[in-house]
Image (spheres, rainbow, N blue to C red):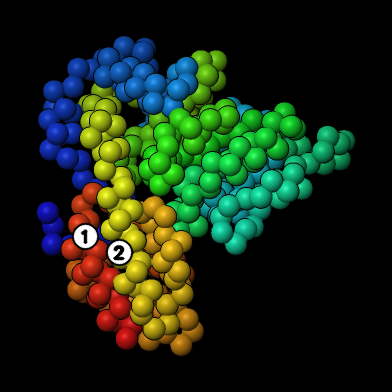
């Protein structure tokens, strides 16, 4: 293990030794022809876990989300989602550039939409209004500090969309973290959503890749869109092999990352000038804000931590994100929390 405690993201994880062995031994073929047996096994396993008909392996979560947007919308239509959604904030304006779709962001205090907010955001059929064509939910929610939308609320939000004949896409980049927190299967979290994307390269620690799942017709069209978006891959079983190991070995341990995040949050919350309710840290993401009179700004705190072997991300002058993963031990979390508290004291 490196002596650096890297809390910038769970995307910084390195593949495990078992992943590397599986990658080296992977049986491969041309995936665009549907002939890569390792990719086929991964897609079948992903579909099985989420209790869907089919799945398609994609290079990134962004591509998976944007394939879904393209699949469910038409140019000049709107996509409704919470204002902090990844699909709006971190995907390079792709829904407009690739699909001609417009965002309809809904601000919330917690990252969790209410049914009435979604109802109010849906544009009624009209000859002079931009039509709503898709609701995107994100669970867990990155910019909301990894908050989890409860199952009952998921059902309510999906119900509003279905009452208007709108499809629902779940950005489930960390849906398995949400499932671990709720103590249920990811299939149950995602039930009722038309398509679901989840990442293999975050807390699951695979080096590359995400999976989009849905019914057979949707995934057949998604494969065409993947090729159009430049995501057709050839002997990619060398990457899918790591994904298969991730599903077998990393899913059962995600709650450990939640425990280290909770400990980290508890220590940081004690520091002066910190706005952080540790009880709201539900998964593996810790966000906290610094008061105007805090000893350091967010960028200065990040610099101070890096000099002491802890890496974190500043999002603006007063907000910091830290993310735990399998390479962060409880000792690492306690060290990082204690250093953060010390620098702010």
Mark 2–mark 1 contact, CB under 8 Å? yes
Residue depicted at 69% across the width and 31% down the height: 162
Q: Position of residue 114 (x, y in %)?
A: 66, 50
Residue depicted at 43% across the width and 27% down the height: 50
Q: Nearer the viewer, residue 121 or 89?
A: 121
Mark 1 surroundings within 10 Å by alpha-carbon count, few (fewer than 14), some (14 through 19), many (20 or more): some
Residue indicated by mark 2 = 263
Q: Which mark is residue 57?
A: none
Q: Label 2 to label 1, Cα distance in Å? A: 8 Å
Q: Position of residue 107 (x, y in %)?
A: 64, 57
Mark 2 surroundings within 10 Å by alpha-carbon count, few (fewer than 14), some (14 through 19), many (20 or more): some
How many discs mark residues in the rendered view?
2
The answer, for residue 92, to whether it is visible in the render is no
The answer, for residue 325, to whether it is visible in the render is yes
| The C terminus sits in image quarter | bottom left
Q: Position of residue 265 (x, y in %)?
A: 35, 66
Residue indicated by mark 1 = 330
The reply, left or right, for residue 78 in relation to residue 199 is right
The reply, left or right, for residue 96 in relation to residue 266 is right
| The N terminus sits in image quarter | bottom left
Q: Nearer the viewer, residue 269 or 72?
A: 269
Residue depicted at 12% across the width and 38% down the height: 17
Q: Quadrant of residue 137?
A: top right
Is disc 2 placed on a helix, strand or loop?
Answer: helix
């Amino acid at each position: 293990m490196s002596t650096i405690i890297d809390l910038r993201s769970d995307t910084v994880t390195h593949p495990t030794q078992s992943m590397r062995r599986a990658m080296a031994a992977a049986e491969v073929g041309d995936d665009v022809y549907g002939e890569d047996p390792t990719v086929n096994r991964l897609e079948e396993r992903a579909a099985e876990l989420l209790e869907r008909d089919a799945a398609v392996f994609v290079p990134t979560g962004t591509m998976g989300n944007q394939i879904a947007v393209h699949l469910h919308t038409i140019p000049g239509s709107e996509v409704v989602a919470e204002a902090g959604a990844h699909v709006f904030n971190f995907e390079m304006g792709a829904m407009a550039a690739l699909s001609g779709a417009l965002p309809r962001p809904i601000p919330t205090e917690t990252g969790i939409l209410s049914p009435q907010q979604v109802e109010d955001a849906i544009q009624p059929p009209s000859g002079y209004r931009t039509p709503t064509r898709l609701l995107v939910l994100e669970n867990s929610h990155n910019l909301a500090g990894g908050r989890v939308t409860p199952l009952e609320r998921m059902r309510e939000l999906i119900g509003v969309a279905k009452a208007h004949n709108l499809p629902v896409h779940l950005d489930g980049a960390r849906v398995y973290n949400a499932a671990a927190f709720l103590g249920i299967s990811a299939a149950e979290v995602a039930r009722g959503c038309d398509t679901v994307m989840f990442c293999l390269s975050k807390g699951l620690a695979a080096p590359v890749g995400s999976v989009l799942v849905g019914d057979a017709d949707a995934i057949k069209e998604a494969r065409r869109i993947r090729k159009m978006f430049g995501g057709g891959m050839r002997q990619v079983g060398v990457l899918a092999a790591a994904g298969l190991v991730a599903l077998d070995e990393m899913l059962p341990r995600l709650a450990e990352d939640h425990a280290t995040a909770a400990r980290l949050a508890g220590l940081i919350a004690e520091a002066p000038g910190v706005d952080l309710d540790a009880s709201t840290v539900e998964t593996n993401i810790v966000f906290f804000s610094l008061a105007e009179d805090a000893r350091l700004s967010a960028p200065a705190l990040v610099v101070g931590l890096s000099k002491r072997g802890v890496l974190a991300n500043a999002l603006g002058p007063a907000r910091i994100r830290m993310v735990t993963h399998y390479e962060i031990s409880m000792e690492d979390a306690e060290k990082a929390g204690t250093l953060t508290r010390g620098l702010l004291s």
